[in-house]
């Protein structure tokens, strides 16, 4: 029996979210009282201004369950973590890694609809190839070993096995650590040292992860090469990956068909219905209507168009918003979303607040949207989860976001420096970095129509993605670009975040997200309190 993370119950106001949360997300009385009092005074606060109070606990952090919702019908196991729909954060590799770790990646829309849909399809189908590397790094038999060393060191590869192929991609042999360990003082051609084709264990293109696991275990090989009928290289299974997938299968985010769960962003222009249709036809289970000002008529109209064409076969998340009135505007529509994304201007690369003067500090923004959702649900029976998008730097911020009404969080800069994010690793002053840019940055808006549409600076898709010099002069950026330190695999980052959130919930004596939200209590802290809570009075010996 396959374990599934994505479950569906499609009645009018009923959903998996409401089955588990009949009255929606319920916050503790002290949380509601403090934030309501601040709102009445016209004061808004964010993460650094609050700190949670510890409570007696009977649970070890490892016992805490982090199942949480990103929409009315989609529940994730990794505390509702989504990777942001940014072109320097989420493409297919990141989305696959997120699904393997119990989260979900939202593929950005600075892509033509066909490419975006193909990425969705690629991620979904990966559960049937169990992490097979479908584009392994290869070398020619006449290459010298020095060329392998240069490539490995230059690209920072952590692996040392490479298929050897001819000009047509036909498999000739395999180079592994075993062969190179005996090279001393020479620089041989790879054909002189490689394991020949006759000694290389291979399997057919139809081999799935379960079959690969059995073959590798039986043959006692750490690399299984996948070839077609013409012996052309098609992929490679790595033992550690396959073995870990077998162990972690219960953590995977899977959709109702048993495929890896993945989402995709769409704009609000009427032409985006074409993109939405293509994505749904490729079995995308969640669409994120992505707009800098989500509480707008085009967003409501697009929700209606999707509902009329596809009914409830796809979940719709809409954003971004940051106020009670904006949430109410979307909830009072005839066609309602399945989730709301909250955050105007809190992101590290976003300048919307400076450019437009609008935006609410994130703790207050999440609470105000929660208040609108709670009141709407109490009145109509229709509740939905909230995603805090932006301003989150660490696991402590995630815990605080959950305490004020969020059920999930979307992370951008936290993931931008990982191995799976798009872009190259850049070395600067001996340290490694990756690029990050806001979808409203000048570079993104000049290059791609998706960014311009997100920030309401283009109404329709142009046949040309770029702009003329005159058009570029009229662009008003709402974001910046820069570098973030390289962090390695996203798995390491998520493990640290999940572990921190588990510890945070345990500090409040809770074993689940819902129990934590109902019992959490925070204090408003001074600037001195913020400083006290961070490492201080130390000299960094690494500098």
Image: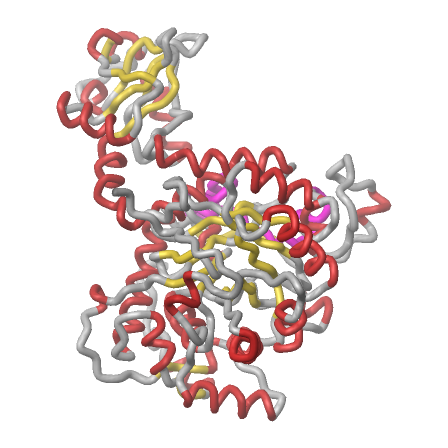
Q: Quadrant of the N terminus?
A: top left
Toward which corner of the image does residue 293 lie, by quadrant? bottom right
Toward which corner of the image does residue 536 lie, by quadrant? bottom left
One can see residue 142 in this view: no
Q: Specify whether 407 is left or right of 213.
A: right
Residue located farthest toward the right when viewing the structure as drawn: 470
**Residue 462's spot in the image, x, y percent?**
78, 40
Instruction: Name the residue rendered at 41%, 73% in the picture.
Output: 22
Q: Is residue 424 magenta?
A: yes
Q: Is residue 229 above or below residue 5?
A: above
Residue 49 vs residue 330, the one in the foreground: 330
Q: Specify whether 477 is left or right of 175.
A: right
**Residue 316's spot in the image, x, y percent?**
56, 55
**Residue 131's spot in the image, x, y percent?**
34, 34
Q: Is residue 540 above or below residue 282?
A: below
Q: Specify whether 88 is left or right of 187.
A: right
Please report the bounds of the magenta region as a residue range.
420-447
Q: Is residue 12 above or below residue 538?
A: above
Residue 118 vs residue 435, the one in the foreground: 118
Instruction: Name the residue rendered at 78%, 50% in the picture.
Output: 458
Q: Is residue 4 magenta?
A: no
Instruction: Name the residue rendered at 48%, 51% in the picture.
Output: 416
């Amino acid at each position: 029996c396959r374990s599934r993370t994505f479950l569906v119950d499609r009645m009018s106001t009923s959903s998996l979210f409401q089955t588990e949360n009949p009255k929606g997300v319920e916050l503790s009385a002290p949380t509601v009282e403090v934030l309501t009092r601040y709102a009445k005074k016209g004061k808004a606060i964010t993460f650094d201004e609050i700190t949670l109070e510890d409570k007696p606990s009977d649970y070890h952090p490892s016992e805490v369950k982090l199942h949480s919702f990103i929409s009315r019908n989609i529940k994730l196991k990794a505390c509702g973590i989504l990777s942001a729909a940014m072109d320097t954060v989420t493409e297919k590799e990141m989305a696959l890694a997120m699904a393997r770790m119990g989260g979900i990646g939202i593929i950005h829309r600075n892509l033509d609809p066909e490419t975006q849909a193909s990425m969705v399809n690629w991620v979904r189908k990966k559960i049937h190839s169990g992490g097979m590397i479908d584009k392994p790094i290869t070398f020619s038999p006449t290459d010298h070993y020095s060329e392998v060393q240069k490539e490995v060191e230059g690209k920072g590869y952590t692996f040392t096995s490479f298929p050897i192929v001819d000009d047509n991609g036909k498999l000739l042999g395999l180079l592994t650590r075993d062969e190179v360990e005996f090279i001393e003082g020479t620089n041989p051609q790879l054909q002189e040292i490689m394991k020949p084709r006759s000694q290389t264990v291979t399997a057919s293109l139809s081999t799935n992860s379960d079959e690969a696991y059995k073959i590798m275990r039986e043959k006692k090989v750490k690399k299984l090469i996948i070839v077609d009928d013409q012996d052309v290289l098609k992929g490679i299974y790595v033992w550690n990956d396959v073995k870990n997938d077998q162990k972690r299968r219960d953590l995977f985010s899977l959709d109702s068909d048993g495929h890896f769960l993945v989402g995709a962003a769409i704009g609000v222009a009427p032409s985006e219905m074409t993109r939405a249709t293509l994505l749904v036809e490729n079995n995308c289970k969640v669409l994120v209507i992505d707009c800098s000002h989500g509480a707008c008529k085009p967003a409501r109209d697009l929700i209606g168009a999707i509902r009329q064409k596809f009914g409830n076969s796809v979940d719709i998340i809409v954003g971004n918003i940051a106020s009670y009135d904006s949430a109410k505007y979307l909830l009072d529509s005839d066609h309602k979303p399945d989730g709301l994304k909250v955050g105007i201007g809190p992101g590290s690369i976003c300048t919307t607040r400076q450019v437009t003067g609008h935006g609410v500090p994130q703790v207050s923004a999440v609470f105000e949207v929660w208040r609108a959702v709670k009141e709407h649900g109490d009145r109509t029976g229709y509740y939905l989860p909230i995603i805090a998008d932006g301003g989150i730097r660490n696991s402590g911020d995630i815990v605080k976001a959950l305490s004020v009404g969020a059920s999930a969080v979307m992370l951008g800069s936290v993931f931008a420096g990982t191995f799976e994010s798009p872009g190259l690793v850049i070395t600067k002053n001996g340290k490694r970095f990756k690029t990050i840019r806001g979808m409203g940055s000048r570079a993104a808006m000049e290059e791609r129509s998706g960014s311009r549409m997100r920030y309401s600076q283009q109404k329709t898709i142009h046949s040309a993605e770029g702009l003329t010099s005159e058009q570029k002069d009229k662009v008003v950026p709402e974001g910046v670009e820069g570098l973030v330190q390289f962090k390695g695999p996203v798995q390491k980052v998520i493990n640290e975040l999940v572990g921190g959130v588990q510890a945070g919930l345990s500090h409040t004596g809770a074993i689940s997200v819902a129990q934590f939200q109902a019992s959490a209590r925070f204090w408003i802290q001074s600037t001195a309190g913020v400083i006290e809570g961070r490492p201080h009075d130390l000299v960094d010996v690494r500098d």
